[in-house]
Amino acid sequence: MSDVAPPVAALIEEFSKLPGIGVKTAQRLTFFILRSPTDQARRLSDAIIRVKESIVYCSRCFNITETDPCPICSNSSREQDVICVVEEPLDVLALEKTGVYKGLYHVLHGALSPMNGIGPKDIRIEELLKRLENETIREVILATNPGFEGDYTASTIKRDIQNELNLPELKITTLARGLPLGSDLEYADEGTLSRALEGRREL
């Protein structure tokens, strides 16, 4: 972009690195910021820096948080013996919006994908197994996204729990298939997620 001022070209390039942002959208965002008041641009900049500097992973569930443990893990009114396993922090937000689920979470930060070289060591499966070993848990809900990778991840976790841990009383369930195959939890509406939680079945 030799015909554009270097600071503008640099901002377009950085925006285009974001997921789902093509060059055209990056250009629109850049010129929107150029037209915006300086204080608005500064607030955006400050918010980005703040989220990078103040957000950590909860040492118990690995959700993103400003305090460790996170507010969900430290809330004594939640069911401490139920863990809902999800792929990403956005899935926690989606399930919390339903108001149905009152237990704890475990965030994997991804799904198993042999084709992309993502194995069990690349996501938080070992940490989940340690939690189950050290905490008194009666149910694990495997709420991975519907589709090959999510199903493969859920079946691997179930196998690891059964092979590596001696927990005969532990119930392993999955969400009911009110969720469309191949969709992500973060895009499902609250009613669909509520029905999926309430209709979960043993895996």
Image: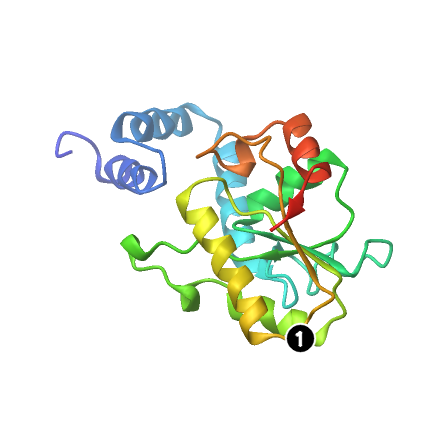
Q: What element carries label 1?
A: helix
Q: Position of residue 18 (x, y in %)?
A: 36, 41
Residue 25 lies, with reference to residue 115, above or below; the image says above
Residue 72 lies, with reference to residue 147, above or below; the image says below
* 161 horizontally vs 33: left or right: right
**Tally of numbered discs:** 1
Front residue of this view, candidates 171 and 127: 171
Q: Can residue 110 be seen in this view?
A: no
Residue 117, quarter of the rendered image: bottom left
* 15 horizontally vs 173: left or right: left
Residue 154 lies, with reference to residue 167, above or below; the image says above
Which three-letter amino acid code belongs to the residue tagged 1?
Answer: Glu
Mark 1 neighbour density, 10 Å: few (under 14) some (14–19) many (20 or more): some
In the rendered image, the residue lying farthest to the right is: 77
Placement of the N terminus among the 4 image quadrants: top left
Q: Name the residue under label 1.
A: 133
* 22 horizontally vs 112: left or right: left
Q: Position of residue 157 (x, y in %)?
A: 52, 61
Front residue of this view, candidates 36 and 108: 108
Q: Where is residue 173 in the image (x, y as percent from the top left)?
A: 65, 50
Residue 57, quarter of the rendered image: bottom right
Residue 118, quarter of the rendered image: bottom left
Q: Which residue corresponds to the image point at 56% horizontal and 75% vertical from the top-left? A: 164
In the rendered image, the residue lying farthest to the left is: 2
Q: Which residue corresponds to the image point at 70% horizontal and 41% vertical from the top-left? A: 96
Colour scheme in use? rainbow
Front residue of this view, candidates 195 and 55: 195
Q: Position of residue 49 (x, y in %)?
A: 50, 52
Q: Is residue 117 visible?
A: yes
Front residue of this view, candidates 67 and 141: 141
Q: Which residue corresponds to the image point at 46% horizontal and 26% vertical from the top-left? A: 36
